[in-house]
Image (spheres, rainbow, N blue to C red):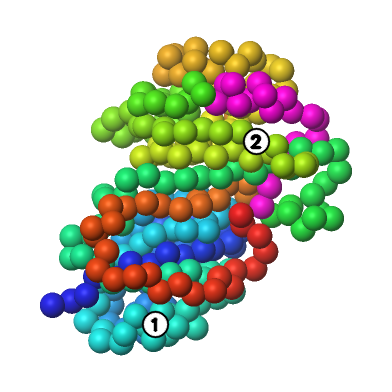
Amino acid sequence: MDRNVSLVVAFEGTGFHGYQTQPGLRTVQETLEESIRRAVRHPVSLIGSGRTDAGVHAAGHVSNFRTSCTLDGRKLAHSLGSRLPKDLSIVALREVKPEFHATKLATSKLYRYRIFNAPHRPVGQLLHRYVYHYWDTLDVEAMNAGSKHFVGKMDYSSMAASGTVRSTMVREVLRCDVERHLDEIRIDVEGTGFLWKQVRTMVGTLVDVGRGRWAPDHVGEILSSCDRREGGPTAPARGLCLRWVRYPSELFCEEEIMLPAVTEGDPR
């Protein structure tokens, strides 16, 4: 019987057109599948924990594939990793139960959005590829107060990309926290799943709160409207990073084989 193998990967999203394979474009999925195919010597179909937009980074994206390859986990991980480009790295590999499905069985995932909030550009800190630069001072307390309206299970139509059509627009956000770390504002959003561009639109809405356009409680009114036109702008992709994805522990067959990350830059 084929083994079911899960991968945790990190990637610097600047050079990718998102995760999902697209004809004629460089994507994370296609690049990974090519590396896996060469290592295991048979075609594979990679199942990802979720799509990411072009330019979005990841520190802990999860995927799984089935293989008849008999290499032990550590040798397989090194074989795969040695074939990857410098902006994509395997962080961990483990064998999982046959029923493991990276998309359907994820219980939650955490996205972090980083805003460099200072008059000078973030080039001196080598962060310009990983943060959204906002010149004027933002009110972090107001942003954090507004963020609490996002927590819960509700219709997020006003936060989804225009034209998004899904069987349901209801999603559940478990937490949304806004904190300042010196010149950087970090917005952490944990949820069970997200609509297309939902997190980036949540961030854009909170930036409008932070700059004084709206009071924190107005976020609740925007959500109630279920109208994308009422929400804030969609924040740039470069500031967003998928930090991790969680699954029930009973789906794992063995301990993770952790590898040192070799991604360039700092997609924290």
Q: Residue sitting at 68 percent across and 47 percent down?
A: 131
| Left or right: 136, with 42 as reference point | right
- Check the picture and name the quadrant holding the C terminus: bottom right
| Left or right: 55, with 164 as reference point | right
**Residue interval drawn in magenta:** 130-147
Q: Is residue 99 visible?
A: yes
- Say if 79 sits above or below 176 in the image: below
Where residue 238 appears, x then y in whole percent? 62, 49
| Left or right: 172, with 242 as reference point | left
Where residue 256 appears, x then y in whole percent? 38, 70
The quadrant holding residue 214 is top right
Name the N-terminal-most of marks 1 and 2: 1
Magenta stretch encompasses residue 137: yes
Q: Is residue 30 visible?
A: no
The quadrant holding residue 212 is top right
Q: Residue sitting at 31 percent across and 34 percent down?
A: 166
Q: Residue sitting at 28 percent across and 52 percent down?
A: 248
Magenta stretch encompasses residue 119: no
**Residue at numbered disc 2:** 179
**Residue at numbered disc 1:** 74
